[in-house]
Image: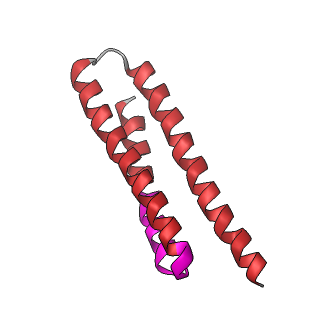
C-alpha cells in the first residue's frame, strides 16, 4: 500500500512538471494565472508529501485511511489541472 501512495506523489510531481512546461508556452496574461495555480498545486503536493511521511511514521497500521485521503487529494489536484488547462483552451478558442 505504501507503494501506491508513493506512486501517487511521484505522479503528482510529474504533472506539476508538465504544468510548468505548459506555463512556459503561455501568454503573459495566462502565465500570471498559471503561476498562481502552480504555486497552489505545489503547496498541495508538498503538504501531501509531508502529511504522508508523518502519517507513515506515526500510524504504520492505518494504510487504508491514508491511501483514501491521498487518493481524494490526488483527484482534487487532477481536477485543478483539468480546470486550469480547460480555461487555457477556452481562451485560445476565444482569440481565434
The relative height of residue 67 versus residue 37 in the rendered view (above or below) is: above
Tell whether 30 sits left or right of 46.
right
Q: At which x and y percent is residue 53? A: 26, 33
For residue 5, which quarter of the picture? Answer: top left
The relative height of residue 80 versus residue 66 in the rendered view (above or below) is: below
- Which residue occupies 70% across, 73% down? 91
Q: At which x and y percent is residue 43? A: 36, 49
- Which residue occupies 52% across, 47% down? 77
For residue 27, which quarter of the picture? Answer: bottom right
Q: Which residues are magenta?
A: 13-30
Please name whichever residue, 26 or 16, is drawn nearer the observer in this view of the structure. Answer: 26
- Which residue occupies 64% across, 56% down? 83
Please name whichever residue, 29 or 14, is drawn nearer the observer in this view of the structure. Answer: 29
| Count of marks, rendered view | 0
Tell whether 54 sits left or right of 13.
left
Q: Is residue 74 magenta?
A: no
Tell whether 55 sits left or right of 20.
left
Q: At which x and y percent is residue 94? A: 77, 77
Please name whichever residue, 28 or 68, is drawn nearer the observer in this view of the structure. Answer: 28
Amino acid at each position: 500500500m505504501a507503494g501506491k501512495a508513493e506512486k501517487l506523489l511521484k505522479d503528482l510531481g510529474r504533472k506539476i512538471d508538465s504544468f510548468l512546461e505548459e506555463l512556459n508556452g503561455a501568454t503573459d496574461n495566462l502565465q500570471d494565472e498559471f503561476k498562481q495555480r502552480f504555486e497552489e498545486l505545489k503547496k498541495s503536493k508538498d503538504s501531501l508529501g509531508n502529511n504522508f511521511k508523518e502519517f507513515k511514521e506515526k500510524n504504520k497500521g492505518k494504510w487504508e485511511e491514508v491511501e483514501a485521503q491521498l487518493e481524494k487529494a490526488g483527484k482534487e489536484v487532477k481536477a485543478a489541472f483539468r480546470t486550469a488547462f480547460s480555461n487555457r483552451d477556452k481562451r485560445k478558442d476565444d482569440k481565434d
